[in-house]
Image (spheres, helix red, strand yellow):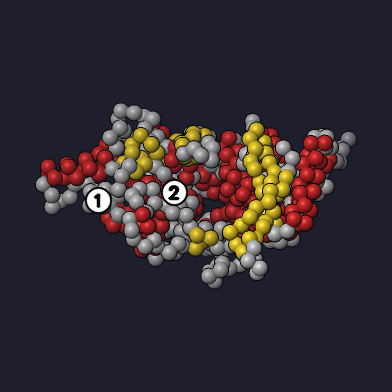
Amino acid sequence: MMAYIRKRTTGQLDKHGDPVVSYQVVWREPVRDEFGAPTGKFKQTSETFPTERKAKARLRKVEDALDDARGVDPSSQKAKANRPLGEYAKQYLDSLAGTVDDSTVDGYANIYRRHIAPTFGSTPVAAITTADVARLRANLLAPHAQRSFVTRGVPRHKKGRKPAKPTMVQRSPKTVKHVLGTLKRVLDVAVDDQAIPSNPVVAGRRHSTKRRTSSDGRKPFKHRPLSGSEVAALHDWIANQRGNPVYALSVVFAAYTGVRVAELQGLQVGDVTLSEIPGTVGSVRIVRTKKKVRAAEDEPLAWTEGTPKSDASTDRVIPLAPWLADDLRDYLTGVHPFAHKYWHAPLFPGRRTRLANSATGPESDLSEEEAQLRQAEFIASFDWAHPIVVDNVYHNYFQPACKALGLGRVRFYDLRHTFATLALSAGEHYMQVSKWLGHSSFVLTLTTYADYIREDDTAAPAFERPRAKSAEATRRVVPLSRRTV
């Protein structure tokens, strides 16, 4: 169906008392998915103009665009230039299959869907300019309202109470760098296809993503390793103030093993090796990761299993300190209901319901029957069939604990830095720490944590005092080049 003009009479009156007439240009265009590919459906689009002359001018442009779309050879440069960015994004993601880990591909796809598709998904690649990229970068760095992490209960505004003022946050320069890097690689596909002569992201590289201060005057965030006493304080606050010793133990476990978030979520009971003798070293084997991803925009989040980040991360064994092994043994024998039944059960469970914080297990002032009931209620508050959701633990337990204890801005990932700094400060060799962390290169460990490698300023190399040879000893030396007859 070609475009046409529809004359409409509005309910407004002009200065002469006559009804105001508007002119609406109407046409149909194909509906595209998140990657810009046609879905086979069409939607009706319209634009309204106050005069017929303006409407006819717009009608000619729309008809010319529709005619060009029908008559252009799909393999021509003009057709390629008019392809939406989403089509090249799909080509880029499809080209990664089999070359990188599936979780990495999913990460790039999530970056595209969340940050790039709303702005450039349906835009022709040839229409994306350096100014558009700079505008996207500025919008990504601008403050925005933090999303809600309320996963249970009813939001305040639905209970009739006034909603709390949203907290304004900013993305880190590293996140913005990942978004622009993904956009660059997608546009590189368009360059290789000769759809555009150059990459506008490359042209905008003079704009640095480094940020000296945030909008509220604070310095940019740096990783914040914790001390042993600070980790203990976090454990006590989560266990006592929030009444959750299970998640308190998971925080200590992450701080003294250095596992990544996805690796912690992927741990199972069978991955832990403990001796029956108290006070002995244990170990944990890292063989899988688990993440919650959304297969499609309209589908709920679901758990997906993958492999660790690199080959060096896969199937590595991390030793457990004797005291940590003892705490895990008590947890698996006294709290975990499936530790001795199912080796594939999650090591740390997800949260099922938000019961009273006092239901934390037996207490000394309770009777034995009351203590057993309290313990049963506490165990039932967890979903032992699904892994721990670190994102919820961070926002509901870890972050409030850091704020209450005055520890400053600490990320859950800083527990991994904590393990590295504590191990190096204790005298462990950086190559051994690198293996425990699962780094792909020893150089990465050395450059990241060089300041934490313990040095003894009073020590000196074990050099022997130099002694000169005597003249007689020198004369006894026979040159090998001299030949005697």
Work out whether mark 2 precedes mark 1 in sequence or the reverse, and give the earlier one: 1
- Quadrant (top left/top right/bottom left/bottom right) for the C terminus: top right
- Return the residue nearer the eye: 254 or 33: 33
Left or right of residue 385, residue 12 in this image = right
Above or below 393: residue 224: below
Q: Where is residue 353 in the image (x, y as percent from the top left)?
A: 31, 44
- Quadrant (top left/top right/bottom left/bottom right) for the N terminus: top right
Report the residue at 30% width, 48% height from top.
354
Q: Position of residue 12 (x, y in %)?
A: 60, 62
Callout 1 amino acid = Ala
- Return the residue nearer the eye: 71 or 444: 71
Left or right of residue 358, residue 35 in this image = right
Callout 2 amino acid = Asp
Report the residue at 53% width, 40% height from top.
297
Which residue ends up furthest to the front in the rendered image? 17
- What label sits on residue 391 in the rendered view? 2
Say what secondary structure mark 1 lies in.
loop
Q: Where is residue 441 in the image (x, y as percent from the top left)?
A: 61, 44
* Residue 133: quarter of image: bottom right
- Return the residue nearer the eye: 336 or 40: 40
Q: Position of residue 291 (x, y in %)?
A: 48, 40
Q: Can residue 458 be seen in this view?
A: yes
Instruction: Quickly name the residue at label 1.
Output: 356
Above or below 17: residue 472: above
* Residue 386: quarter of image: top left
Left or right of residue 114, residue 239 in this image = left
